[in-house]
Image: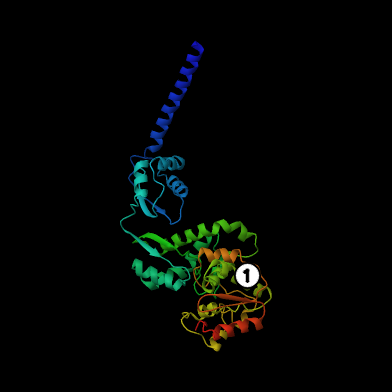
Amino acid sequence: MKKKVKITIIIISIIAVLLIAASILYMILSMPVDKNSNKKIEVVVEQGMSTKQIAKLLEKKNIIRSSSFFLIYLKLNKCDSLKAGPYDFTKSMNVKQVKEKLCGGKVKKDSIKVTFKEGKRLTSYISLISEKFNINEEEVKNTFNNKEYLKELINKYWFLTDEILNENIYYPLEGYLYPETYEFNKKSNTKEIITRLLDQTDKVLTPYKNQITTSGKSVHYYLTMASIAELEGLNEKDRKMIVGVFNNRINKGMNIGSDVTTYYGLQKPMTSDLTAQEFAQPNAYNTRASNMAGKPPVGPICSPSKSSIEAAINPTASDYLFFVADKNGKVYYTKTNREHEQTIKEIKQAGNWIW
């Protein structure tokens, strides 16, 4: 009996020690990293970031002591949804204060939401930046075209290479700025904005990094194909099929023959049909021109979505060589030019031609 009592006392003592240790650890991990530091530290929580990613970011910025503890704290305090946006933190904030700021979406007062839409050209982004941040448009354009700055970016980001410096490319960062809704400081400059968008591109492309590096094709190629698929197809299924058709044509030494590349090459909006002379006009983008047989355009023609990037990297294999879409966005695939011309005739007869 005495032995049982002793064992019970030992167990209770161990539990008590563990509870005391846990309480002390809880208190320590809840405390500020540095109660004397009031220096503001900006943390940008991007759209789509997981709670775990946010916790890791806060730990990396030295705002919390432990990301693992922070995740447990959020669960215990019933906060599973952290709001995106730019925040100002200090090391003197405790875990409760950090949690309340993120759960309440208490972003910086001087922040602004800006949506960069998929399928838009860089010229559209330049105008948007100028308008939203009150920066002279020519100044924004000069930043985008600054060779020394572009070389700095190439050294910083794994997916940027000297391919973007090709003299035939209109805008070196075309297709590389990920389309998304972002929250910025109203006083952000062009370089800070570019960095935010490129950081998001990095997050989107990194899961494909090994696949890309072992494929024998460059990121530039995939983003170029993704940008064309973005404008040619309305959904991922068609975009995958379309890229597969383009790959087939390139492998056979044929022209891609994509009208959207002609519009971009001429820097014209896609609001009306082009002439035969315009379709035949040679440049490094126009895949309808005779000098572009077996070649993709020199670079992307818009900012592609995640769906189009996935389509470019993992296209659907087929033996189709032609496709055409009607005014409703339905895509028809054929194997021969004769079948292709017949499909076009039928679309026109049905009154479904795009123009």
Q: Position of residue 126 (x, y in %)?
A: 41, 70
Q: Secondary structure at mark 1?
A: helix
The answer to whether any part of residue 93 appears in the image is no
Find the residue positioned furthest to the front. 350
At horizontal 63% and vertical 70% (from top left) the residue drawn is 244
**Where residue 162 sits in the image (x, y, percent)?**
56, 66
Residue type (three-letter) at the residue carrying disc 1: Gly
Give the answer, above or below, for where 329 lies relative to 102: below
Which residue is nearer to you in this view: 110 or 271? 271
Residue 164 drawn at (x, y percent): 54, 69
In this rendering, position of residue 123 left or right of residue 237: left
Residue located at (62% from left, 84% from top): 342
Q: Is residue 266 visible?
A: yes
Between 305 and 330, the one lying in front of the other is 330
Residue annotated with mark 1: 244
> In x, y percent, where is residue 49?
46, 53
